[in-house]
Image (cartoon, rainbow, N blue to C red):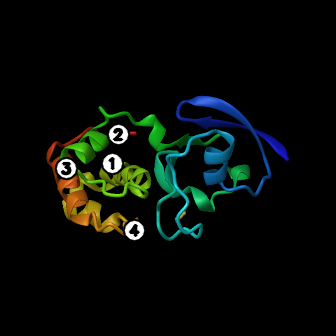
Amino acid sequence: MTRYRLQVNGRMVEVEADPAMPLLFVLRDRLGLRGAKYGCGAGLCGACTVHVDGRAERSCLLPVDGLVGREIRTIESLDQTHPVVAAWIREGVAQCGYCQPGLVMAVTAAIEEHGARGVDAVMDSLTNICRCGTAPAVRRAVASLVAARLPSRLA
Ligand code: FES
């Protein structure tokens, strides 16, 4: 076990973890932040998506040892007034909800990176998988966010 000081959702936290422990398990099992979900554990589904230094990352693939000094943000840092969360509620995107925290974090980063190029650019950049088939509702939410021309930094 190694003791780490990490920056999570704007504050410094200390955790003891094996250096190879994925960030997803540090968040869920050490810090009690259970928004990011375990889906595939292989970087494929995106249920575990969080932000690291403002970019969407699969937290199931990131060993904690490489995250010292990085800015980690999870779905818990976004409240219901956040533009993406508000759009999700307005458009009724979530169905079972399991993958939605990861999807919201992915869309937040995608709007920042691709929003100026339009809805298709944002949608084409998403690789998260939703078994409920929420893609049409996701597209409506993304379209409303792109139309609103949000500030470039959402997280
Ligand atoms: Fe991380 Fe599926 S659980 S990508």
Mark 1 vs mark 2: which is more N-terminal? 1
Q: Amino acid at mark 1?
A: Glu
Residue identified by numbered label 3: 91
Can you name the residue that lies furthest to the front here? 96
Q: Label 1, label 2: how many angstroms apart (C-alpha)?
A: 7 Å
State the image coordinates of residue 97 (x, y, percent, origin top left): 38, 54
Q: Label 4, label 1: how many angstroms apart (C-alpha)?
A: 20 Å
Q: Residues within 10 Å of mark 2 (few under 14, many from 20)?
A: some
Residue identified by numbered label 1: 112
Residue drawn at x 37%, y 33% as measured from the top left: 79
Mark 4 vs mark 1: which is more N-terminal? 1
Q: Amino acid at mark 3?
A: Glu
Left or right side of 69 for 127:
left
User: Quarter-wise, where is residue 13 in the image?
Assistant: top right
Residue identified by numbered label 4: 129
Residue drawn at x 75%, y 58% as measured from the top left: 20
Q: Judging from the image, what secondary structure is the residue with disc 1 in?
A: helix
Residue depth check, mark 2 versus mark 4: number of the one nearer the observer:
4
Q: Judging from the image, what secondary structure is the residue with disc 2 in?
A: loop
Q: Judging from the image, what secondary structure is the residue with disc 4 in?
A: loop
Q: Amino acid at mark 4?
A: Ile
Disc 1, disc 2: CB below 8 Å? Answer: yes
Residue depth check, mark 1 versus mark 3: number of the one nearer the observer:
3
Mark 1 vs mark 3: which is more N-terminal? 3
State the image coordinates of residue 18 (x, y, percent, origin top left): 80, 52
Residue identified by numbered label 2: 154
Disc 3, disc 4: CB below 8 Å? Answer: no
Left or right side of 71 for 5:
right
> Who is closer to the viewer here, 46 or 113?
46
